[in-house]
Amino acid sequence: MSAALDARTFPRNHRDGRSRASSGPRCSTSVPRASSSSRSARDEVFTFEQTTHSDDIFAAAACRSIAFASSGAYADRSDFARRAKVAMKTEAESESLMKKLRLLGACEVGYESVVTSLIVARREIGQNGEIPMWFDARSLDPRCMSSREGFVMSIVAGSLDLNVGERLPAEELAGALSPGKRAYLSNVSVLPPVRRRGIAFGMINRALDVARDEFGVETVYVHAEASNSRAIALYEKIGFEMETREPDGVIVTHGRPPRVLFRRGTRTS
């Protein structure tokens, strides 16, 4: 069973004629949903892809903007304030992603020695515009839609960045105990209506495969706030181990909670 969504609501040029950076994904894997107690979750299929397509990039930027606005300082703001924040953040994040992926000529400041790949989680929409019944059409932001091939559309439900380099720009914690080439995950985000369906798990596993097979990376790192128990539980479930932790004093010196750095080998099962 699916809820209907008229495909004409999201025509091919629904992003005001934005230019396309690529004709399609660089690589993809269609993976059945991870186990869940919900039947609708088990029946769903999400595709976890590495992509440079402009529609995907914009949808990923919107996805993470919405995800981050649903928590933190903007969680208790008015709907108008959140929408304004999402709109502003989406445009800025889209441009930043294009620069990180070297698609605008200029490189994002600080990423000159970092190679970034974008991983997205998508769920295709039916030919008649159907969306999953568990996804409330009223809450679906059209900016999270991608139409790479004609009217074959999909919901970009999650995204993350895989950054290959010695350290992640703007992060003080850097890996120090791993031999060989390393990479960092960042901006791991999932749309609120589809959380706890294994999407982050699937994206991270896809990123580990790309890091190992395409870039020869031996160790992948990820940061998390020390108080973010859900993120920490997810990373530990996937096999990440804590390498180091910032002191509590960063609350005073940096005005933010302390962060933890986790690592995992790409060849660890």
Image (spheres, helix red, strand yellow):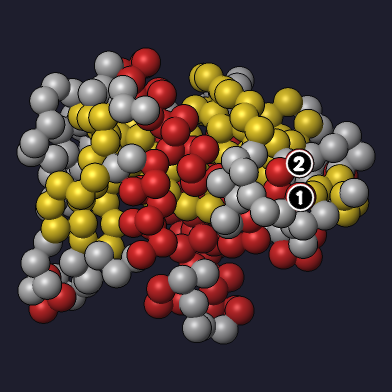
Q: Residues within 10 Å of mark 2 (few under 14, many from 20)?
A: few
Drawn side of residue 246 relative to residue 135, left or right: left
Q: Secondary structure at mark 2?
A: helix
**Residue 252 percent location from the top left of the image:** 11, 78
Mark 2 to mark 1 CA distance (whole Å): 6 Å
Drawn side of residue 208 relative to residue 246, left or right: right
Q: Is residue 218 above or below residue 224?
A: above
Image quadrant where one finds the C terminus: top left
For the point 44% across and 33% down, which residue is it?
A: 205
Q: Is residue 111 above or below residue 22?
A: below
Contact, mark 2 vs mark 1 (Cβ under 8 Å)? yes
Q: Secondary structure at mark 1?
A: helix
For the point 90% across and 49% down, which residue is it?
A: 1
Which residue does the numbered mark 2 point to in the structure image? 43
Amino acid type of the residue that numbered disc 1 sits on in the rendered structure? Arg
**Residue 126 percent location from the top left of the image:** 85, 37
Drawn side of residue 120 relative to residue 175, left or right: right
Q: Quadrant of residue 224?
A: bottom left
Can you see residue 255? yes
